[in-house]
Image: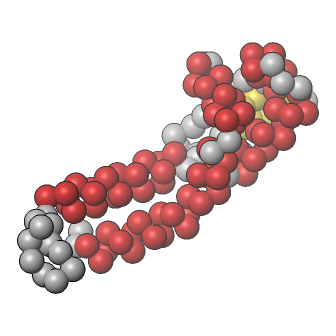
Amino acid sequence: MDCAERQRAIAGGFQKCRNAFTALGDETRQLILLVLLESDLSGVRVGEIAQKIHLTRPSVSHHLQILKGAGIVSMRREGTKNYYYLSADQTRWRDLATLVELIYESVRHISTQPHTSSRGGEV
């Protein structure tokens, strides 16, 4: 991938992942993700998350809706119960990883190039 293609891919990735980055920036939502990462893949109910991070159920529900809307967590319903979980296939995690990898490749590419001053000489 050449530099211009990589730049377009990065710009598109930022646009695609904007809501996910915003959602991930909140410390409470980070705590919720840690709880989900510690759980098995069958999912965790709001009450259990609230108990582990010492927040109210409405507060946890609010943050889970933001994470779900941003494509960070998935939810499955069993009767009247909702279970929240992380899924590699049903969320933005792959998009986030691809974007970070593209940025990393760009930084590595820039780091290997000789540095030049604004007048065209090497620094």
Find the residue positioned furthest to the bottom: 119
Above or below residue 67? Residue 39 is above
Judging depth in this view, the residue of 111 and 123 nearest the camera is 123
* Rendered location of residue 104, percent (x, y): 31, 53
Compared across the picture, whether 88 is left or right of 6 comes to right
Q: Could one spot residue 109 in this view of the protein? A: yes
Quarter of the image for the N terminus: give it: bottom left
Coloration mode: secondary structure
* Rendered location of residue 49, percent (x, y): 76, 22
The image quarter in which residue 59 lies: top right
Q: Tell me which residue sits at (72%, 33%) in the image.
A: 28
* Rendered location of residue 73, percent (x, y): 66, 40
Judging depth in this view, the residue of 117 and 58 nearest the camera is 117
Quarter of the image for the C terminus: give it: bottom left
Labels in figure, total: 0
Compared across the picture, whether 48 is left or right of 24 comes to right
Q: Could one spot residue 78 in this view of the protein? A: no
Q: Tell me which residue sits at (78%, 40%) in the image.
A: 63
Q: Tell me which residue sits at (35%, 57%) in the image.
A: 103
Above or below residue 77? Residue 99 is below
Q: Tell me which residue sits at (22%, 73%) in the image.
A: 2
* Rendered location of residue 76, percent (x, y): 74, 35
The image quarter in which residue 118 lies: bottom left
